[in-house]
Amino acid sequence: MIRTVQLTKSFGERTLWRDVDLEVSTGKMLALVGPSGSGKTTLLNCLGLLEQPSGGDILHDGKRLTRLGAGGRRRFRRAHLGYLFQNYALMENATIKQNLDVAGRDQQLQSRALERVGLAGREREKVHRMSGGEQQRIALARLMVKKPSLVLADEPTGALDEDNGRMVIDTLRQMADEGCAVVVATHNDDVRDACDEVFDVHTQRLAVVG
């Protein structure tokens, strides 16, 4: 479970959001929505300890992440966090297997992950020869191999066709159902509707889906 307490982020005199109180439990998906420039990605990056908030606290299972030093932040990201970026963040000149090895070397787990995303038997292929949809599937497989407790996804369907976008949504939903806490920054209505709650970063309103 991850929770924010009166989280605030400012750049100079401009405040993106103030006193944000959110809670995402294991097994749940939260969508961050709002217009471009409202601070969805910035909030996601603060949750992932990639950016420092201007005020407030972030707690993971009761531990104050905002008090961690550089080493503690690295250890938290390595032990608990899985990121899914719009630009995939893969090693393009490496093979699929080499990309998965970064997350974990369990061969059975790698094989199951690749089968789940429709890339079984393609471990030796180079990433740079693959389409955008296939690269996002590799990124998803890498998440499954790592088995994080917290997944942060930034516009994960933004550059994908409908079929690949649906596969991403279904996989994130399944990871949540298996015990992850998932936070997704998105403009996509299908992604939003697959989540349990929606937080509008601009209005700072939280709503339950359905």
Image (spheres, rainbow, N blue to C red):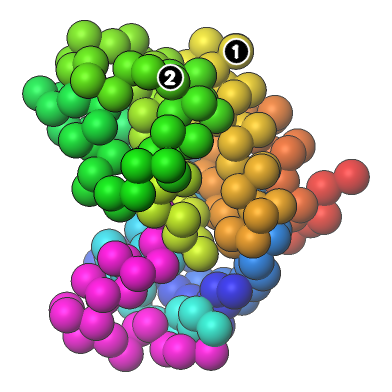
In the picture, which quadrant includes the N terminus? Answer: bottom right
Which mark is in front, 1 or 2? 2
Image disc number at residue 125: none
Q: Amino acid at mark 2?
A: Leu
Upstream in the sequence, badge 1 or badge 2?
Answer: 2
Frontmost residue, 116 versus 134: 116
Q: Is residue 70 left or right of residue 184?
A: left
Frontmost residue, 88 versus 158: 88
Residue 133 in sight: yes
Around disc 1, counting alpha carbons within 10 Å, would you say few (fewer than 14), some (14 to 19), or many (20 or more)?
few
Secondary structure, mark 1, is helix
Residue 77 x %, y %: 31, 66
Q: Residue at x 28, y 86 (%)?
A: 68
Residue 120 x %, y %: 43, 20
Q: Residue at x 70, y 28 (%)?
A: 190
Secondary structure, mark 2, is loop
* Residue that mark 2 sits on: 119
- CB-based contact (under 8 Å), mark 1 and mark 2: no
In the picture, which quadrant includes the C terminus? Answer: top right
What is the residue that sits farthest to the right in this orientation?
210
Residue 24 x %, y %: 64, 67
What is the residue that sits farthest to the front in this orientation?
108
Q: Is residue 90 magenta?
A: no
| Magenta span: chief secondary structure | helix
Q: Is residue 94 above or below residue 43?
A: above
Task: Give the magenta part as a residue range.
Answer: 62-82
Image disc number at residue 162: 1
Q: Is residue 79 magenta?
A: yes
Q: Is residue 89 left or right of residue 173?
A: left
Q: Is residue 9 left or right of residue 117?
A: left
Q: Amino acid at mark 1?
A: Glu
Residue 16 in sight: no
